[in-house]
Every structure is written in C-alpha cells, then in structure tokens.
Image (tube, rainbow, N blue to C red):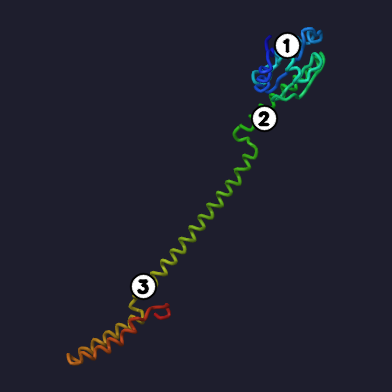
Amino acid sequence: MSGLVEIKSPSEWQSLLSGTTIVVADFYADWCGPCKQIAPIFQRLATQHASPKKVAFAKVNVDSQPEVAQQNRVSAMPTFKIFQNGSCIQTIQGADPTGLSQAVAKAVQLAGAGKAHKAGFKTPGRTLGGESASRPSSAVSSLQLGNLLSTLISFIGLYLVSFFSFDGQKAAEQSRFNVHNAQQSQTAASGSRAGFGSGSGSGSGAKPSGSSTRPQQRAAFKTLADL
C-alpha cells in the first residue's frame, strides 16, 4: 500500500518512532468491520501527507503484533494514535473519519512548524538579538580606539615636553651667558696671569690659586634665575 508502513516486528516499530518526527498509527484487526470501513480514508491520508523522516503512517495488526499493541495500551479497534518524536500526543478510538482527518492535519502542521522553527534560527541576519548585539560591540570598539588615541597623544606630549626641557637645561649650562661659566673663565684667566708674573721661583704660589678655583668648578646650574 502506497504511503503506508506495515509493522512486522517491535524493532521495526521502534525504529519508525525514533527515525520519524510524526507517526500516525492505525491499530486494527482483520475481523474488525469498522476497521475495514475507515481503512480507505486512512490510506488516502497517508498518500496525501506521508513524507520520509517527517510524517509516516503505520498499520499495526493487533493479532500479529500483540506486544506493540500492549505497549501502547490498545483495548479497542480501530484505535489511532499520533506520535511526535516517539511520544504519543493524541489518541482517537473508533471509526471517526472527521476526527481522524482533523488530527492528521494538526500533526502535519506540527512537523512543518518544527522544521520552519529550526530554519528560522539558521537564517543569516535573522538570529535573535543579532542586530542589536552588533551595536554595543561597535560602541565598545569606538571607545577603545578613543582611549588609545588619547593615551598616545598624552605620551607624545609628555615626551616632547621632557625632551625640550632637557635640551634647554643643557644649553643653559653650556651657554657663555651663564654667570658661573663667566666666573670660572675670569678665575682661570687671573690664575694664569699670576703664574706668569711670579716666574719660575713662584711656582708654589700657583697652587693656592688652583685650589681656590675648585669649589667654583663644582658649582652647577640650578635655575634660569641664576643666568
């Protein structure tokens, strides 16, 4: 029968339940009159809605498969059970074509809704909170970039200030306008004149002059006010 799965063993039944999202099962008996009456309707529904791995229609003969019938607590025929992911979600007892058709239509919608729900989360750019999550990330990146530039500018400014301040101090110490440098030059000149005036016999007199100039040589430039 097209679209129908005739269950031959409990293992086949379990395999169908575990491998199919929706399973619509018809528990019947060959000697049951109402089962024979509704069988064409069940066949038509199977032909219309059966889909591999998604929706399956199974027929279970309670006489040849009593173990499967007992596991599902079937006590009257025909009994239709609808399973979703292996769990029974609806039971219909008796030959009720309208009730069976409505139940199958709802079950098929469940199988389609489950697929659409998963696909919606896989669609790029439509994930939950995807767009709003990117905005805080951009704001954090901008803030980090601003902090980096601010730190870099501060570092360069401090470096330049220190650089020019150091050169200014060095130039001031070596400048000929430095009063300490002028005093040292005058002292050195007077010492030289005294040495030449005293001659060779007064060489010992040059030593006090040399010693008197040593404290002045240790003087160091401190501030610009000393210029």
Image-based side of 125 in relation to 110, left or right: left
- Which label belongs to residue 64? 1
Residue drawn at 33 percent across, 81 percent down: 217
Residue 172 percent location from the top left of the image: 37, 75
Residue 150 percent location from the top left of the image: 52, 57
Asked if disc 2 and disc 3 are in contact, CB closer than 8 Å, the reply is no
In the displayed orientation, state which residue is furthest to the front. 67
Image-based side of 17 in relation to 189, left or right: right
Is 135 placed above or below 184 here? above
Marks 2 and 3, how far apart in space? Answer: 78 Å
| Amino acid type of the residue that numbered disc 2 sits on in the rendered structure | His
Residue drawn at 43 percent across, 80 percent down: 225
Image-based side of 110 in relation to 223, left or right: right
Marks 1 and 3, how far apart in space? Answer: 112 Å
Residue 41 percent location from the top left of the image: 76, 11
Closer to the camera in the image, 26 or 54: 26
Residue 4 appears in view: no
Residue 74 percent location from the top left of the image: 79, 18
| Amino acid type of the residue that numbered disc 1 sits on in the rendered structure | Ser
Is 97 placed above or below 88 here? above
Q: Nearer the viewer, mark 1 or mark 3?
A: 1
Residue drawn at 62 percent across, 40 percent down: 131
- Which label belongs to residue 171? 3
Closer to the camera in the image, 126 or 91: 91
Is 151 placed above or below 123 here? below
Neighbor class of circle 3 (other Cα within 10 Å; few <14, some 14-19, many 20+) is few
> Which residue carries the number 2 mark?
117
| Amino acid type of the residue that numbered disc 3 sits on in the rendered structure | Ala
Closer to the camera in the image, 101 or 168: 101
Along the polypeptide, which appears first: circle 2 or circle 3?
A: 2
Task: Find residue 127 and report its image quarter.
Answer: top right
Q: What element carries label 1?
A: loop
